[in-house]
Image (cartoon, helix red, strand yellow):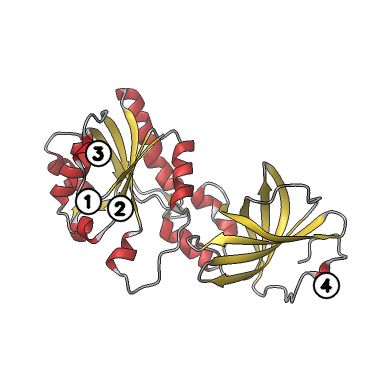
Amino acid sequence: METIHLRYPIEKSSVCKRESCVLALGFFDGIHVGHRAILEKAKQIAKQKRLKFGVMTFFPHPKDILFPEKKPMKYLTPLKVKEEGFKELGVEKLFIVEFTPEFSALSPKEFVDQYICSFQCKHVVAGFDYCYGAKGKGNIATMAEHGEGEFEVTVISKVKHHYEKISSTAIRGLLAHGRVRDIPSYLGRPYQVQGTSIYYSHVGQNNIFMEIHVDREYRLPKPGLYKLKVEVNGSSYEGVCHQMFINKNGASLLIQMKKCDGREDFNSVIISWLDFIKGEPNKLNDMNEYIQRDELVI
């Protein structure tokens, strides 16, 4: 996958000799079921037309630029994780547009001319509610008009779960209420975060208590006790999240892993949030009180 970083104004070297492509447009936080419908359609069209399968996304989130007085955005998929997800889905060209005040001031027509047509896009695929240009005045209904025949447009209808639109906002709401069990219906998989081990200690014969650092860009579920799946180097273990400690550098999660002998390299850990157990975290001053237990402490 070729990744192209763009900042307004676009340098001429960025647009010269570009191969024709199909572009899926969106922010794609989480790459949820609705996003996948857009991406799969774009991939299908690219294959039919023998064009490159491309995605154009943006970073940071527009809210961070348009409303700087508010708290920084927390993501379902930070940019690096989102890039990995696109690559797994077969994206051949990834355009990451830096969202700046200058970029946000472009008219809808200027955006289409400079960011769609200039990159040899022959077909756009986007969701029914996609907006672009200053104050979001451009929408999917005006996209073809602004393109002046340079490309075709395919609109993906609303994707729903139990009459609710599947969206990144809906998933953030589920996290805020601890409803991680419901997230696979929206995300297509359990909610995951990646982290690194700060410290771990053996518990009994087959358990480990571990403190995991999670980057501050990740959005976490509300505090509480959670059932987890913990993946380390391709191996999966049952786990429980006992506590979350939030600070300016991110979060530290105190987790317990079942049937783990501690021989793994814990440098990189993937945590899948499976279910909410209770709202009150276990009161742990340290790990020692559980050191003799050989079972998940819930």
Quarter of the figure that contains the C terminus: bottom right
Residue at the spot 40% in from the left edge and 71% down from the top edge: 71
Q: Measure how far apart labels 2 and 1 are at the Cα level.
A: 8 Å
Instruction: Compare marks 4 and 1 and give the one earlier in the sequence.
Output: 1
Image side of residue 202 versus residue 143, left or right: right
Residue under numbered circle 3: 14
- Mark identifier at residue 98: 2
Image quadrant in which you'd find residue 15: top left
Residue under numbered circle 1: 8
Residue 145 x %, y %: 13, 42
Instruction: Compare marks 2 and 4 and give the one earlier in the sequence.
Output: 2
Q: Are marks 2 and 1 in contact (CB under 8 Å)?
A: yes
Residue 262 x %, y %: 78, 51
Residue under numbered circle 4: 289
**Front of the two marks 3 and 4:** 3
For label 4, the SS is: helix
Q: Measure how far apart labels 3 and 4 are at the Cα level.
A: 59 Å
Residue 117 x %, y %: 18, 38
Residue type at tag 2: Glu
Residue type at tag 1: Tyr
Image quadrant in which you'd find residue 120: top left
Residue at the spot 70% in from the left edge and 47% down from the top edge: 265
Q: Measure how far apart labels 2 and 4 are at the Cα level.
A: 49 Å
- Crowding near the residue tagged with mark 3, few <14, some 14–19, many ≥20 C-alpha atoms within 10 Å: few
Residue type at tag 3: Ser
